[in-house]
Amino acid sequence: MKKLACSFFILIFFIFMIACTNENKTTKEDIANSPKESVEDTSTKEVKNILFFGNSLTAGYGLELSQAFPALIQAKIDSLNLPYKVINAGLSGETTESGNTRIDWMLNQKIDVLVLELGGNDGLRGISPELTKKNLQSIIEKTKNKYPDVKIVLAGMEAPPNMGEKFTSDFRKLYKELAEANQIAFIPFLLEGVGGDPKLNLPDGIHPTPEGHKIVAETVWKVLKEVL
């Protein structure tokens, strides 16, 4: 009887020890996992905003938003695992004058990089290059005043040749002059290799096709990647 009781207590003891061992293993695993999660959280980089501020070219007129060049730029950024988020603020029909008003509202959100693409509609409407330059300068100044550390990329445009040689020349020069005066990154012509090519533009002859936007994205990326 005594031997039976002794065996019983030994069995209970071993069951107790096994239970305690399993509990300790679980606790150690939880502790081991906890610091790892903490490291991942603290290593997350702050995501910065890139505002693409422009007209129908930026908006991707006639296409899905995912086919417009800002979305293609986001894909490049993601593939390189860079901490930037693209904000497409393209608005069809936008002129530099209306853009100078709209930028006030857009600057309510933090902007780290501004890609400024405006003026095309000014050229089509024959608006004075001097006024276009003044409006673009105002947009640049407003952005810098609100966010002193902002980086700006200015996309140049061309006026249609039927506006006259002086007009097209003055229009082309205003972008370069703005870029130099403000010491900002500069894309000489946003539609380089696309403008005027029927195969790369929609039937209106103004807005790029999906293939056209791919070329525009490459043109923009050549300058933007250096800024980022």
Image (cartoon, rainbow, N blue to C red):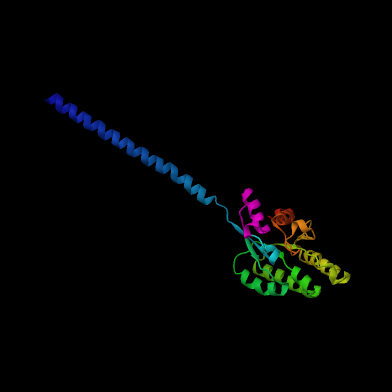
In the rendered view, would you say 74 is above or below 106? above
Residue 119 seen anywhere in this rendered image of the structure: no
Write down the quadrant of residue 53 in the picture: bottom right
Give the farthest residue toward the left.
1
Which residue is rendered at x = 64% and y = 73% of the image? Answer: 104
Q: Is residue 218 left or right of residue 11?
A: right
Q: Position of residue 27 (x, y in %)?
A: 37, 41
Q: Residue 8: which quarter of the image?
A: top left
Q: Give the position of the C terminus as an image quadrant.
A: bottom right
> Start and end of the magenta stretch?
64-86
Judging depth in this view, the residue of 16 and 120 nearest the camera is 120
At horizontal 64% and vertical 62% (from top left) the residue drawn is 88
Query: For the point 33% across and 36% down, which residue is it?
Result: 22
x 63%, y 48%: residue: 79
- Image side of residue 216 versus residue 168, left or right: left
Q: Is residue 61 above or below residue 225?
A: below
Q: Is residue 228 magenta?
A: no
Q: Nearer the viewer, residue 73 or 51?
A: 73
Q: Residue 74 colored magenta?
A: yes
Horizontal and vertical percent position of residue 216: 73, 57
Q: Is residue 210 visible?
A: yes
Secondary structure of the magenta portion, mostly? helix
Q: Which residue in the rendered view is the most extreme toward the right?
A: 165
Q: How many marks?
A: 0
Front residue of 144/197: it is 197
